[in-house]
Image (spheres, grey):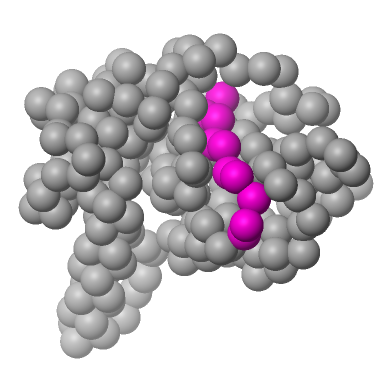
Amino acid sequence: MTIRNGAGAPGRSREWCRINAKAGAATEILIYDVIGSYWLDTDAQTIATQIKELDSDEIVVRINSPGGDAFDGIAIMNALRAHSAKVTVRIDGLAASAASVIAMAGDEIIMGEGSQMMIHEAWLYTSGTADYLRAEADRLDKMTDSITAVYARRAGGEFDEWRALVAAETWFTADEAVAAGLADKVGASAPASGELSAAFNLSQFRFAGREHAPAPGSPLPRR
C-alpha cells in the first residue's frame, strides 16, 4: 500500500511515505520526504490507520526526511509504538525534526553509515496580533517540551540537558547519535525497496547539516 499526493510537477505524484506489506515478511515503511498534511496534502491519520491494520510481527521503518509537521510525526510515532510488532528503525540518510521523533518509536534504532539526526525546537509560520502571537509562543513552548520528553525518555539523562540540546538545534553524526542514546548502533543500510530519493533544502534550519553545525555536548548518561 502506498500513500501518495498530487504535489510536484503536473501529471506526477509525489510520494513521501510508502508501506510495503508482504505476507510472511517484515513490513517495510519508507518515509522519504517532508512529513505532514500542510506540505503534502496528506494526513498522518491515513498512515496511522494503515499501521494499526498491519498484520505483521515485524515492522522496519526506513527514514530519509528533513521533518515536517510535529503533530503528524508524534501521531506516526505513537501508532508504531502501539502496534504489537517489533519495530526496527533504520536511518538511511537524514532524520531531522519530526522525522527524528518518528525514529524514537523503534525498539531498535540503527543509524546507517554517514547518516545524521537533528533535534530542534518546534516552530511555525504565523501572523496576527500581539496577544495572538504570545499565545502561539506558549503553544510552541509546550510542543517543544513534549518533544524533548520523547528524547529524554529514550536516551536517559536530565530533561533540562535535552532541552538545551533541542534549543541549540543539535545535529548528530551516526556515531554521535549512538553515544547520546538516540540510537542503538551504526550499521550499513540495505537498499530500500523501490526508487525513493530526495534532495532536501535545509536552509530553514540554523545549520545546513552536521558539517556546518558544532559538535553536540558531552554524551548524556545512558539508561
User: Along the horizontal axis of the image, is 184 left or right of 21?
Assistant: left
- Residue 51: percent from left, percent from top: 70, 59
Which image quarter is the C terminus in?
A: top left
Residue 120 vs residue 221, the one in the foreground: 221
User: Along the horizontal axis of the image, is 56 left or right of 209?
Assistant: right
Residue 151 vs residue 31, the one in the foreground: 151
Taking the spot 20% from the left edge, 35% from the top edge, the residue there is 222
Kindly report the secondary structure that dominates the magenta region of the rendered protein: strand
Taking the spot 38% from the left edge, 31% from the top edge, the residue there is 183
Q: Is residue 63 visible?
A: no
Q: Tell me if residue 87 is in the magenta stretch.
A: yes
- Residue 44: percent from left, percent from top: 62, 64
- Quadrant in which residue 165 is drawn: top left
Name above or below for residue 18 compared with residue 216. Answer: below
Q: Is residue 174 visible?
A: yes
Name above or below for residue 176 compared with residue 76. Answer: above
Q: Tell me if residue 18 is in the magenta stretch.
A: no
- Quadrant in which residue 43 is drawn: bottom right
Taking the spot 49% from the left edge, 42% from the top edge, the residue there is 107
User: Along the horizontal axis of the image, is 99 left or right of 213?
Assistant: right
- Quadrant in which residue 149 is drawn: bottom left
- Residue 69: percent from left, percent from top: 49, 59
Which region of the structure is painted magenta? 83-92
Residue 219 vs residue 70, the one in the foreground: 219
Residue 145 vs residue 14, the one in the foreground: 145
Taking the spot 14% from the left edge, 35% from the top edge, the residue there is 221
- Residue 212: percent from left, percent from top: 27, 20
